[in-house]
Amino acid sequence: MHTTTCNITRIRFASTRATTVFAAILAALAAPVRADLLTTESVAIQGSGGSGGSGTSASDMIYAQYNASDGWGWAGGAGAVQGNLAITNNGGYSAPANEAFSFVVGPTVAALNATYGAGNWTITDPTLTFTSSYSVQNNSRFGIGSGTYEVYWVSNDNWSQSKGTLAAGPAPNPIYATSEAQLLTWTATDSDLGPQTFTVPAGGSGYVDLSDSLAANSPLVSDIVDASTSVDPNVSLYLMSTSNTLGMIIFTGGQSQPLPTLNFDVVAVPEPSTFILLAAGAVGLVGFGLRRRKAA
């Protein structure tokens, strides 16, 4: 009777210990892995210097319709994301427009690979920063107003700003899109990096520095990490207005304001050895418990 009780106690002990160990493993695997910060990088677009059209490969204010002055797109000292109810300086309403940016990240990635080794780092916390204004501009291209917009990563880097012609259509500009489905008719793949809001305070005026947090669990990360100096060095973002009242100017080289910039933290890729050792130890403990049970 004493022997039976001892066997049951040992079995319960082994079972409890195994359950505790596996619970610890599952908790460790579920917990976020701490990544060591290596550095922080910032890549700005090439500025247009306030001269219309000179920023053709870096920024593009994309119009919904062709107009005589700008054609299908504009790249001056500023661009804009706006709907058809944003207020312009002449008291009228703005022409709907989206905005595209291209960031040349290839040289930055090459430097990171040289420093840390390819495959030994990745990125976290990507953000898009730029300068806007709460004031009505003295340029009727740009409207002002509160509203919402969406930021997309797009795989199509083969674009540039161009006035073009009415007959030829918008190419090589990106298309003006009001939905992701429309956007996908121009780019092979995309990724929604999150909704954003621009709010003009009552009586607001002057410049404002904005920062949009971008989704990190997206192809944006791999596009940055896999970029090279000679092959596919660019990363493109597309800002789409989702509100008719939105009027948000983005300075791209005019009035000495900071350029739109893609920022991200560079972190070390976690080593898997800790989890391998933990799992091996758990197997050993379970095996030990089973052997003790059989011996009893």
Image (tube, rainbow, N blue to C red):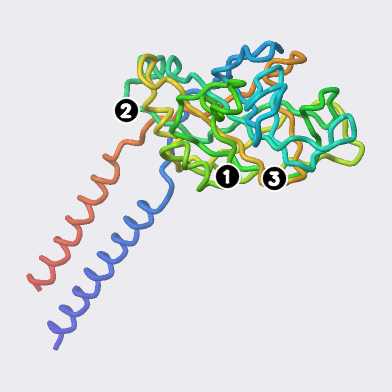
Q: Residue furthest front?
A: 167
- Sequence-wise first label, 2 or 3: 2
Measuring from the top left, give residue 260's x and y in whole percent.
63, 24
- Sequence-wise first label, 1 or 3: 3
**111 relative to 223, above or below:** above
Name the residue beneath numbered marker 3: 148
Residue at 58% from the left image edge and 22% from the top image edge = 164
Name the residue beneath numbered marker 1: 194
Which mark is drawn over residue 101? none
Secondary structure under badge 1? Answer: strand
**46 relative to 119, above or below:** above
Residue at 74% from the left image edge and 29% from the top image edge = 249
Q: Quadrant of the C terminus?
A: bottom left
**Nearer to us in this view, 26 or 95:** 95
Q: Residues within 10 Å of mark 1 (few under 14, many from 20)?
A: few
Q: Amino acid at mark 1?
A: Gly
Residue at 58% from the left image edge and 20% from the top image edge = 162
Secondary structure under badge 3? Answer: strand
Secondary structure under badge 2? Answer: loop
**Nearer to us in this view, 39 or 156:** 156
Q: Disc 2 to disc 3, how far (Cα)?
A: 37 Å
- Sequence-wise first label, 1 or 2: 2
CB contact under 8 Å: marks 1 and 2: no
Measuring from the top left, give residue 137's x and y in whole percent.
84, 26
